[in-house]
Every structure is written in structure tokens, then in C-alpha cells.
Image (cartoon, helix red, strand yellow):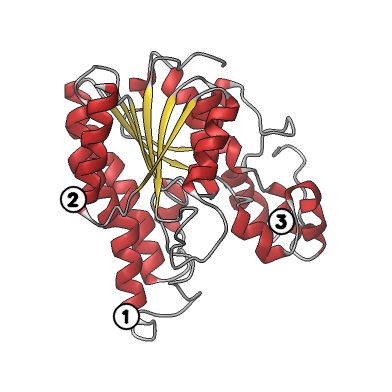
Amino acid sequence: MPEQLKDRVALVAGATRGAGRGIAVELGAAGATVYVTGRSTRTHRSEYDRPETIEDTADLVSEAGGHGIAVPTDHLDPAQVRTLVDRIAGEQGRLDVLVNDVWGGETLFAWDTPVWEHDLDKGLRLLRLAVETHAITSHHALPLLLRHPGGLVVEMTDGTAEYNRDTYRVNFFYDLAKASVLRMAFALAHELGPRGATAVALTPGWLRSEMMLDNFGVREDNWREATTRVPHFAISETPRYVGRAVAALAADPDVARWNGQSLSSGGLAQVYGFTDLDGSRPDAWRYLVEVQDADKPADTTGYR
């Protein structure tokens, strides 16, 4: 969809790596001006202490055909977020797409650990990073987004509303964080819909983020080697796949039909016809229910 978003302005909050980077790049590939934010820059690393930076993401956006603008921002600091939005308003006069993708919790949760045994400080920090950042960003950015009709807010989470309703996700803090983001999209839809904008929740499937590839000791070009140890990793997808989902939503003149809904990259691929970088259409959440959670052998036939 080259140039389909040529006159659109997007803010991807939390675009340093993973889904945020994939979304920013695909919005750029569609021609958008994309402000990319995060705490990892070429001169300062966040506590993640990883090499990815927002400047690198902005460069990738521009290389893809858009205009990438990196703005270091801690979305837990309302003053920084207000300054960011004021800058977008001053430079562009509009905001058409807001992607709330701030997460930052990978090092803060322990698997299958009950709340009374979990490190409390880490759990509360996770909730602040995963929930409070989204609320602060929406508070400051939505007045600008509402200046023009047709705005889109995408709340990024892990899991569909249906899947998370019936499935315990990792631990108390993780489960609460992901459910909260789903509910934020629902609440925003009620507040934005009558004012001419749309809010949705969106989840990727099993994401081949930079950190996930590192954890499995593989690269994007040889990721299938990891399936010898984790067979169900065969259903995984690149961050660009969910990026194409956001770009498709942003370019849809009838995007309001999705207002308040919980969506997935694989589900939207069936509607809009986009594919992952390898030409496949992984449908991870259907696979998780029908194959992985059903304790069947890994087999992606009919799922990608």
C-alpha cells in the first residue's frame, strides 16, 4: 500500500524494538510520517541494555518510504509526553494514528508465580509500564488526534479478549496488565466513537522479536532451527506482520467498523489480504487453541 498514508501522521509509543518497530516501519512503507518514541537511544540505553534504538527505528521508517522522527520519551513522565505531543502539534498540526505499544515488562515477571510469592516491586513496576504509560499517552495525545475526523488508536496487547478471558496468562501481574489494555481499548472506543475516531485492541501472534530470537539463539534468517527445541514456534511471525495489520487499519476508510473490538494480526490478514514477509499468513491464536493448547503435535498446515 505505497503512499496510501502519505498525508497521515502517526505516533508509535514504544517503537524501539519488537512489534513497535515493525508497526512503525510498515506505517512508513505506506508513506506516513511516524514519530517513534522510547527510552533507548544511541547515547543512552534503558534498563533493557539492548542495542536497538529509536534512531535506528526512525531510519528504517524513512528507508521504507515514510518519514521517521525519533523523539526520546519516557511515557511514565506526563511532562515528557506533553512536550512530545506539543511538538507533533507544532510540526504537523495533526495526529491521525496513535499506537500505544509501551510495555517494558520482559525482565519484571516470573512465570507461574502466585502474587504472594512474586517480587512486589517488579510486579507494580510492570503494571506502571504496561498500563499507566498508555493512560498518560492517551490523555495528552487524544485531543490532537480528535482535531480531524477518522483518527485511529491501537492498543497493543498480548492475546485476544476471547483467549485471555479463558486463559491464565503467565502470572497475576502479567494477566492483569494484558487484560487492562484490552479494556482500555473498549473504554476508548466508547469515548472516541461518537467523536469520529476509532479505538481497537490488537495482538500479534508468537512474535519473532529481537529478544525472542536472541532467547532461542537464532536469527531471522534461520529461525526455523529453533523449532527442533520448541516445535510450536513454527507458527511464529515477524513484527512486520502486525505492522501490516496496523497499516491496513489506518488505510481503511471504513475502519470504524472495528471500533472497540479485539483484533489479531492473523485475523486481520484474512480480511485485508496482507501477508508476513515470507508470503504466509500465520493465524497464531487459532493455532494456539486448536493445536498447542489441545496438546496436539506441532503442525501449521492450514494455519499459515
Q: How many marks?
A: 3
Q: Residue furthest front?
A: 43
Kindly identify the amino acid type of the residue bearing the numbered disc 3: His
Identify the residue position indicated by label 1 in the image. 120
Q: Quadrant of the C terminus?
A: top right
Q: Earlier in the sequence, mark 2 or mark 3?
A: 2
Farthest residue toward the bottom? 117
| Residue at the (20%, 25%) spot, across then down | 146
Q: Which residue is mark 3?
A: 232
Q: Locate residue 296: give its quadrant.
A: bottom right
Q: Which element carries disc 1, helix, strand or loop?
A: helix
Task: Judge the density around disc 2: few (<14), some (14-19), many (≥20) Cα neighbours within 10 Å.
Answer: few
Q: Nearer the viewer, residue 104 or 117?
A: 104
Give the foreground label among 2 and 3.
2
Q: Mark 2 highlights which residue?
A: 79
Mark 1 vs mark 3: give the one in front: 1
Q: Is residue 132 visible?
A: yes
The amino acid type of the residue labelled 2 equals: Ala
Q: Residues within 10 Å of mark 1 (few under 14, many from 20)?
A: some
